[in-house]
Amino acid sequence: QVQLVESGGGLVQAGGSLRLSCAASGRTFSRYAVGWFRQAPGKEREFVAAINRYNSITDYGDSVKGRFAISRDNAKNTVYLQMNSLKPEDTAVYYCAAREGVGNYYYPTRYDYWGQGTQVTVSP
């Protein structure tokens, strides 16, 4: 089992940057694929980015491609989401999620473990 804690959210102006972190407990974090999702009020949870357990394959949602970058440091049990060129429509609660597996996963239902979320607000 793994526990996830997100941090790094906050208020930023459009065009700015934030880096989110997802810290995981447990000694077997390297066995887990990790994804970032976001959810804005009144909307469904949206896939943002995913990284496989080997830190070799990354995938992104269409709305963030070219602006966001996911990475991981298995020695620190941490996954990062670097968010650049932020837009007001990026405003949401951002969640990290994990599951054991060798690939990347794009749907919330494929993940077994979730963090509590961190709020990102982008002002115009």
Image (cartoon, rainbow, N blue to C red):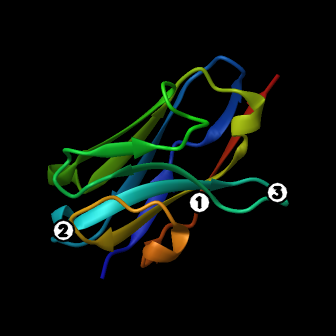
Q: Amino acid at mark 3?
A: Pro
Disc 2 to disc 3, how far (Cα)? 32 Å
Residue carrying label 3:
41
Mark 3 and mark 1 residues within 8 Å of each other at the beta carbon: no
Q: Check disc 1 and report the residue beneath it.
A: 117
Q: Position of residue 13 (x, y in %)?
A: 72, 22
Q: Which residue is mark 2?
A: 31
- 4 left or right of 53 in image: right
Few, some or many C-alpha atoms within 10 Å of disc 2 (few <14, some 14-19, many ≥20)? some
Viewer-proximal residue among 47 and 81: 47
Q: Position of residue 86 (x, y in %)?
A: 64, 26
Residue drawn at x 44%, y 65% is 97
Quadrant assignment for the C terminus: top right
Q: Quadrant of the N terminus?
A: bottom left
Q: Quadrant of residue 57?
A: top left
User: Residue at (56%, 34%) from the top-left corner?
Assistant: 64
Q: Residue at x 39, y 44 (%)?
A: 59
Image position, residue 95 (x, y; %): 55, 58
Q: Give the alpha-carbon distance from disc 3 to disc 1, as whole Å.
A: 13 Å
